[in-house]
Image (cartoon, rainbow, N blue to C red):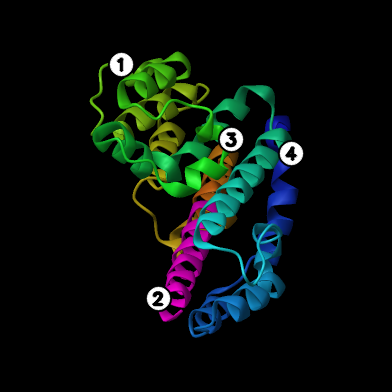
Amino acid sequence: MSTAFAYALPRMHARMAERADERARKRLAAVDDFGHFVQLAARGGFGPWLKNLGTTSGVHAVEYALREAYRARLGELAGWLSRRWRPAVEWLALAPDLPVLAELLQQGRRAEWMALDPRWSRLPTEPGKLRQALLEHWPELEPFGDDRLAEAWFERARMLLPPLNKRSARMLEALLQAHLELADADRLIKLFRRESAAPVRVFAWTGLERLDFEFLRGHLVRRRLQMREAA
């Protein structure tokens, strides 16, 4: 195994052993109450995701806390890798925010949770100024319109990958796409466990992290909105 991944992969395998399986997810999906869902999920493999949420957290707090947890998990993984791989992993953290960024750039509407998030609250809300602020750290955005953020994100994601053989490069590009169009969990698990190329295993794992983010976000936001409507 490459020394670039020798430190990371055993830790990722330990995380995989702690990850909630499909049966646990189905049990959670059957829980209608927001607070009960949070409590059961925290005991059922999602504890690190939910450490900043409680049974009465509002919907905007949910959106922000889950993003913070997702970024922290990717940041931790990046820290396990050699320096040349860190930017590519850290860049993945932006993917869940692309739809709300696109809405802000195109329509001038900022999602309310963004006011809680220092990553976005410091940036201008006026679309033209926001685009200029983004370009300072994301020059690949320049040729893409505001309705093509996903393409611009993917272009930078590809550029941040270290040199790879053709097979691994092709597989990693597909795994990057899985952060925009969510992939099948079973396929990602199989790649993580069986693939010989360590970079592919790492990015298969990031795809699973992306699925976990969307699983929690979907269930928690829906239940919290139902509570608000019932009140």
Residue designated by label 3: 118
Dominant secondary structure (helix, strand or loop) of the stretch shown in magenta: helix
Q: Is residue 201 above or below residue 46?
A: above
**Which amino acid, by three-letter code, is at mark 1?**
Glu
Which structural element holds mark 1? loop
Q: Which residue is mark 2?
A: 229
Determine which quarter of the picture holds residue 77: top right
Q: Quadrant of residue 50?
A: bottom right
Amino acid of disc 3: Pro
Q: Which residues are magenta?
A: 209-231
Marks 4 & 3, CB-CB < 8 Å contact: no
Image point (66%, 60%), residue name: 16
Q: Residue furthest front?
A: 231
Tell us which disc is closer to us: 4 or 1. 1
Of callouts 1 and 2, the N-terminal one: 1
Residue 216 highlighted magenta (yes or no): yes
Residue 63: x percent and y percent? Answer: 51, 54
SS type, badge 4: helix
Element under label 2? helix
**Amino acid of disc 4:** Ala
Q: Which mark is residue 142?
A: 1
For marks 4 and 3, give the one nearer the viewer.
3
Q: How many C-alpha atoms fall within 10 Å of the one at disc 1: few (<14), some, or many (≥20)?
A: few
Nearest to N terminus: mark 3 or mark 1: 3
What is the C-alpha distance between the residues marked 2 and 4?
50 Å
Q: Residues within 10 Å of mark 2 (few under 14, many from 20)?
A: few
